[in-house]
Structure formats: C-alpha cells, structure tokens
Image: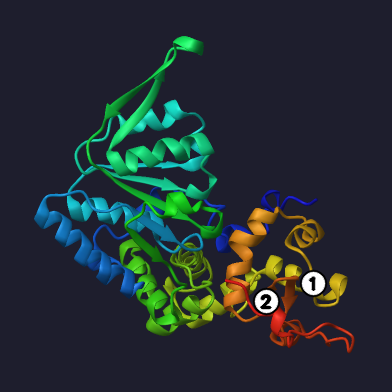
Amino acid sequence: MHNQEDNPEFSAGLVRPELASDDERDRALRPHFLADFQGQEQIRSNLAVFIEAARERGESLDHLFLIGPPGLGKTTLAQITANELGVDFKVTSAPALDKPKDLAGILTTVTERTVFFIDEIHRLKPAIEEMLYIAMEDYELDWIIGQGPSARTVRIPIPPFTLVGATTRAGMVSSPLISRFGIVQRFNFYTHEELASIIMRSAGILGAGINRDAAFALARCSRGTPRVANRLLRRMRDFAQVLGEGTITSGIVSVGMEKLEIDSLGLERYDREILSSIILNFGGGPVGAETLAISVGESQDTLEDYYEPYLIQSGLLQRTPRGRMVTDRAYELLGMEKRKNARNDDDANERLLF
C-alpha cells in the first residue's frame, strides 16, 4: 500500500482538504461574520434569521447540525455563529473525546449561550453520545461518583449552550442524536461564480494580484471547495512571482495546474487512478468501496469522504446498491473504450444513492 503523503511531488495536499493543517494562513482567509460569508445562500439566510431571533430573545441558539464534504465551511460557519451571537466558542472533534470526563471537562466550563463545536460528530463513542443527550436536552450532566455497589449518579447543571455538530457522514449519526438538533443544514459544493468571488476576496487579503478571468480559471479547478481554492491560490501566487510578473493570469493558472497535475475539472492524479482502477480491474463496476479502496491503496474512509463526493458531483462516478460504477463521461475523460460486456446503469435497481 503506497503512502501518497510521503511523495513530495504528489499534489493531493492541495486538493484534499483534510491533509493540510489548519494553520494561521487558513484562518486569516476565513470570514468572521455572515455578511462576509459567500455561497451557501440558503444556509446563510436561514441562519441569519435564527441567530437574530435568539439574540433578541436573549436565548441560546437551538443546536445546529451541519452536513457536507470537508472544506465547505462548516467550522467557519460555527465560528461565525458564535461571533454573531457575541458568545464564547469552544471547539473539539469526536475522536478527541475519548472518555466521559473529556466531555465533562469542556461542558463544565461553558458560559451562558456558548457555542460548542464538535467536528466529525459521527465518530462519537456511545458513552459520550449518551452523556451528550442529557446535556443537549436538559442542560445537565450525569456524573458517576464512586465504584461498584457504592457508586451513585450526580446530576450537575450546566448553562444553556448551543452544540454545533459537523459531519461528512450523516448516515453514520444515530437517529436519537440527530433528533436533538433543532436546526439541520446541508452544505453543497460551491459554484464557479461563488468560488471566483471567494478567490478575489482571498487574493485581496494576501495582497496577490489576480484578474477576474484567472479567478474563474482557478475556480474551475477547485473542486467546488473554498479551502481547495484558497490553497491553490497561494500556489498560483508562487508561480506568478517566480515564473511571471507577479500577477496571477489565466496563463499562470494553466501552467501552474499542469505542473501540479490538476486538470480543468479539478481532478488530480489520484482521482484518475480511482476511475482507471474501476475500469481496468473491475470492468467499469460495480465494485464495493472496501475492495476499491484496497485496489488503489487508500483507506475506505478517505475514499468515501474525500474522493467520491466530488467524483459523483462531477458525473464521473455512480454509487449504486451493488457498488461503485464509472459513467460514460469517465471513459471519455480517460480516453478509454467501454467494453461491450461492461455493466451499465440502466437497471432501475442501480439508481444513485444519496
């Protein structure tokens, strides 16, 4: 199994949002208030109403559940929610909550109306999740004191707070947990126009010159994802500085994308390896996610969370009850011929799963 992160020439760090660290450069480009948040218009407009209503009533905002692929702004929107409400913001991820005391340690320090963000909430352990139920509904914590027959449960009150849970895998979140969220919002990939606006804004913050045509060219390569767009923007700034005259032009974007092995759809080498593997090794599919992940040397979680959503959105891959199948468009993109005995997707039982 090959390790792509050890390959310095591999461009996945630019197009896979989970690989790059959440450093100061990323945070510097993030909007801080709803007025600066671009895209996701329905989420933004609805949340503006909910926040204003909670603020006028002096209440904590209902618990908020955010669904969508990585890099679309879930963490940013959670921080914006706290900023708009003028309250404290606490952040963690489900894997970091290993024991009940980890959750208790955070919840016992929240202040009135604090926004508490849990990323990857689908990975909560059952004991943590059950503890969270009472905290979300009753603003109390059940804490066990002692051991064995003498153990007793003490209920500790905590201030009203807002839990913001984010996930890339809504199907893995239990129904009892989802039902406790008063607001549920699903993120979509951004349009080229929205990404171009984000790129122009980020370029201004970075002090990088870029024209509108170049911003759109870069947007088309950004997989519908602002985090990817911002990372590619920084690389194009490097190319413009060294190979050009300092301004990012369409020509610089074209040269830069070629050097990074990223095509005009935003696909990089690993995306093409996934599609090629399905065609060459499995006759175009269907093939199960676990088998496909093994064939390309990647974890199933990474395949399903970070590659499939965009390949499906781009019309190159289908997820059916029997497994993953490439589309005719994938054959055209790769310049491959579809075998006559390859399975097709005409069967009504192999419709897309969402």
Q: CA distance from mark 1 to mark 2?
A: 11 Å
**Colouring method of the image:** rainbow
Residue 187 image position (x, y, % from top left): 43, 67
Q: For this rendering, which residue is in front, 83 or 323?
A: 323
The residue carrying mark 1 is: 278
Q: Quadrant for residue 53, please give it.
A: bottom left
- The amino acid at mark 2 is Gln
Is 124 drawn above or below residue 70 in the view shown?
above
Residue at (45, 61) in percent of width and height: 67
Instruction: Describe residue 94's horizontal placement relative to residue 9 as left or right.
Output: left
Q: Disc 2 designates what residue?
A: 318
Percent of width and height locating residue 315: 62, 81
Callout 1: 10 Å neighbours few (<14), some, many (20+)? many
Residue 153 screen position, x and y as percent: 38, 21
Quadrant (top left/top right/bottom left/bottom right) for the C terminus: bottom right
Identified by mark 1, the residue type is Ile
Q: Is residue 28 left or right of residue 50?
A: right
In front of the other: 135 or 337: 135
Q: Residue 180's x, y, as percent?
A: 37, 51
Q: Of 208 and 295, which appears nearest the observer?
A: 295
At x 81%, y 77%, the residue is: 284
Q: Where 197 sits versus 341, above or below?
A: above
Between 70 and 226, the one nearer to me in the picture: 70
Q: Is residue 120 visible?
A: no
Q: Residue furthest top?
A: 150
